[in-house]
Image (cartoon, coloured by chain):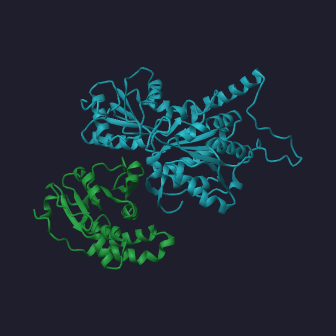
Chain colours: A cyan, B green
Amino acid sequence: MSEKILMKGNEALAEAAIRAGCRHFFGYPITPQSELAAYMAKRLPKMGGTYLQAESEVAAINMVYGASAAGVRVMTSSSSPGVSLKGEGISYMIGADLPGLIVNINRGGPGLGSIQPSQADYWMATRATGHGDGHVFVLAPSTVQEMADLARMAFDLGDRYRMPAMILADGLLGQMMEPVEMPDPINPADLPPKPWATTGTKGEREHNIVNSLSLVSQVLEDMVLERNERYQRIKEVEQIAQLEHTEDAELVVVAYGAASRIARSAVNAAREEGLKVGMIRPITLWPFPTKAIEDVCATAQAFLSVELSTGQMVDDVKLAVSGRRPVSFFGHSGGIVPTPAEVLVAIKKALAGEVFHILPFHSKLEAGD
Amino acid sequence: MTQEYRDLSEAKELSILLAGFGGQGILFAGKLVAYAGLLDGREVSWLPSYGPEMRGGTANCSVCLSDSPIGSPLVTDPDVLVAFNRPSYDSFIDKVKPGGLVLVDKSMIDVCPLRADIRFEGIEATRLAEDNELSGLGNVVAVGKLLQLTGFSTVPQVEIAIEKSVSAKHIDLLEFNKQALALGFAHQSEADCAR
């Protein structure tokens, strides 16, 4: 470990990816992830790596597919509309059992939307990054330190389970600076070997094939079911969540990423008023930390999901709670970041026994026009 | 006269909003404050405005210094507002917490506050920098004054923060930055907005 330095989230993620042994980056520019690509453009060529600005997001993700098939650690980064474009390629990577890091610095949507912080890509990330029966790991950092730490974890998980991993962050985490302690660098040559990779047989083994096409239905079903077993194993052992003040909490707020920062301020303010409020912060969004939620169902009377969306993760909270407790929602969309004061109001409503799904509506209509 | 205001040097949490035109070095000034906090072993965050509001030529940045982990890094109601132009002053003056501090660059803003519940301080940061052959370093002069007023860190720590923050390309400006810091730190307040 080295001394703490002040770094932007986007840059910390990039540096940590390099230290995780990633030497290949393919991308296409989009705000608010640009510093990440710029950092890679500056660093990778000097280390014998590849930085390539592709002609499109579709091209970039297929370059990631190719490099991953060749056995190297590789990544791409983009923001919401760009990640939509990558969807097809991500599905092909899932179908070919290829690891690789995809970073989504989520912005306001749908469409071109805004460039402000948003969590409206939760469904896309956890449900349908691409077509077909498949998943990617989805990791949600909430600090600049975690932007760095989860980058390494994403590469490790992806390689271990042979599947893509996504870091789902937003403009707030990408643009802000915080102190960060960088992990020690790994030499790519010291990474575990990938016997499945297309590295050249050197006349010593059968050739490897990396492909997602399987025209015989029974063969395809077997492959899909094998992958599904892997998913079930991952759900058993790879869930990660941070619990704060949940031991005696009557109300448990569930929030991830930037929203968890706002929610923490509100939870701390509630605690100062003597209110029994805690927080579960999912770090893995897929697999969703259902166990943490199930565990606190024993003591918590109600849940409140706080998101920068119209309510997406709240679905997963409800699935985990499974009707045992009421689940409410508070959020902003479009790139608006809620204030801790607003969240505190929602916390008090939920503590008073109200069950709600609130989206503040700021238009002229509300003003009486 | 200042007893009625909070003693910010003892604050366990300090939220600062720095705002002005793009090109006035707002983000750099914020970075110096954040870096000094880091060197002091505190929790810090620095968040720039990067959205469409920047396209109008204004820039602002939120800096939080705290003894405990920082929740929201977005400062909406600051303890301290440092305003480098009139539009920024007008936008944020009503958001400053009661008992808080407003520091304005008086070379850019000719105003006396309507609020009596905040401490108001001015420094002609831009002009002072120019008069001392430190043109373009009004931002660092203001950081010096902010340091004097709030004690958010110490001069030696902010000097190290300058060393960490000035890029290799501008290494020749290192000493000028330190001079600008000293200039602001030594500045005597004038009570020109009579209360």
Q: Quadrant of the N terminus of chain B?
A: bottom left
Apparent side of residue A243 relative to residue A46 in the rendered image (left or right) = left
Q: Residue furthest bottom?
A: B132
Apparent side of residue A283 relative to residue A70 in the rendered image (left or right) = left
Q: Nearer the viewer, residue A113 or A351?
A: A113
Q: Residue furthest left?
A: B195
- Based on the displayed image, in which of its 4 quarters is residue A298 positioned? top left
Q: Nearer the viewer, residue A238 or A55?
A: A55
Apparent side of residue A183 relative to residue A107 in the rendered image (left or right) = right
Camera sees residue B12: no
B42 above or below B130? above
B25 above or below A226? below
Q: What residue is shown at x 48% (from left), y 74% (from top)?
A: B171
Q: What residue is shown at x 77% (from left), y 43% (from top)?
A: A195
B41 above or below B136? above
Apparent side of residue A264 relative to residue A366 in the rendered image (left or right) = right
Camera sees residue B52: yes
Q: Residue furthest right?
A: A203
| Residue A330 at x, y percent in the picture | 36, 32
Q: What residue is shown at x 48% (from left), y 28% (from top)?
A: A316
Q: Quadrant of the C terminus of chain B?
A: bottom left
| Residue B19 at x, y percent in the picture | 32, 58
